[in-house]
Every structure is written in structure tokens, then in C-alpha cells.
Image (cartoon, helix red, strand yellow):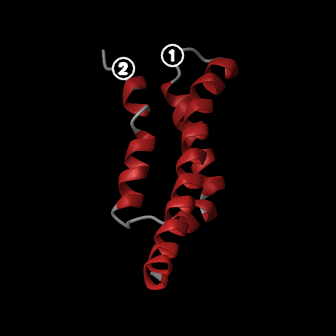
Amino acid sequence: MFNPLPALCLVPAVYFGLLYFGVLTHEKMRRWRRWSWIAILILAAVVTPTGDIFTMLLLALPMVVGHEVIVWSAALRERRMQAAPARARRR
């Protein structure tokens, strides 16, 4: 039987790859935050081995935290990338 739980741990890595190659920006991810949370909750409800809400939330919580960490790190990275040419011109 296929167990999709380990594959769900790769979702933040996929987000980071899309951000790194410029397919996504942190602004897009912030605008889509509500839909991302809904998609994560639906995915957790489908993948949860039992039908109770507690298990679903235990599965969804790390994905939501991973999503938020990626959004914040992408915003920080974009700020640093914008500030890097300004620092190079000062030298």
C-alpha cells in the first residue's frame, strides 16, 4: 500500500525550489496564503489514516508551519537580493 506521508514532507522543498528558480515570489505566496492553507487541510483530510480531526490537524500543522517558514525566508532572501547591488555600488 502506498503511504503518502513521507512525500508530504517534501512540499516545503518544492516550494523552495520554485522560489529559487523564480516561478513563485513571496508576494504571490502571501496572496495565496488562504488557499494554500485550505489546500493543505484538504490534503491532510484525504491522507489522514483515521477520520478524526485531531489526527488531521497533527498532519496539517507541520505543513502549514513549513509553508509559513518558506514564505518568510523567501521574503528575507528577496530583500537581501535587492540590497546586494546597493551594497556593491557603495564600495
Question: Which residue ends up furthest to the left in the rendered image?
Answer: 1
Q: Total marks drawn?
A: 2
Which of these two is toward me, 26 or 85? 85
Instruction: From the top left corner, tell me how far across and down residue 67 is, in percent.
Output: 55, 45
Q: Assign a secondary structure to mark 1.
A: loop
Residue corresponding to mark 1: 49
Q: Quadrant of residue 31?
A: bottom right
Which of these two is toward me, 11 or 41? 11
Which of these two is toward me, 49 or 81? 81
- With 28 as the anchor, is 11 left or right in this view? left
Q: Assign a secondary structure to mark 2.
A: loop
Question: Which residue ends up furthest to the front in the rendered image?
Answer: 91
Name the kind of residue labelled 2 in the image.
Asn
Q: Quadrant of the N terminus?
A: top left
Instruction: From the top left corner, tell me how far across and down residue 37 is, in percent.
Output: 62, 46
Spatial CA span between label 1 and label 2:
10 Å
Residue corresponding to mark 2: 3
Please determine whether, in this image, residue 14 is positioned above or below residue 1: below
Instruction: From the top left corner, tell me how far across and down residue 72 is, in percent.
Output: 59, 53
Q: Quadrant of residue 7?
A: top left
What residue is shown at x 49% (from left), y 77% (from top)?
A: 87
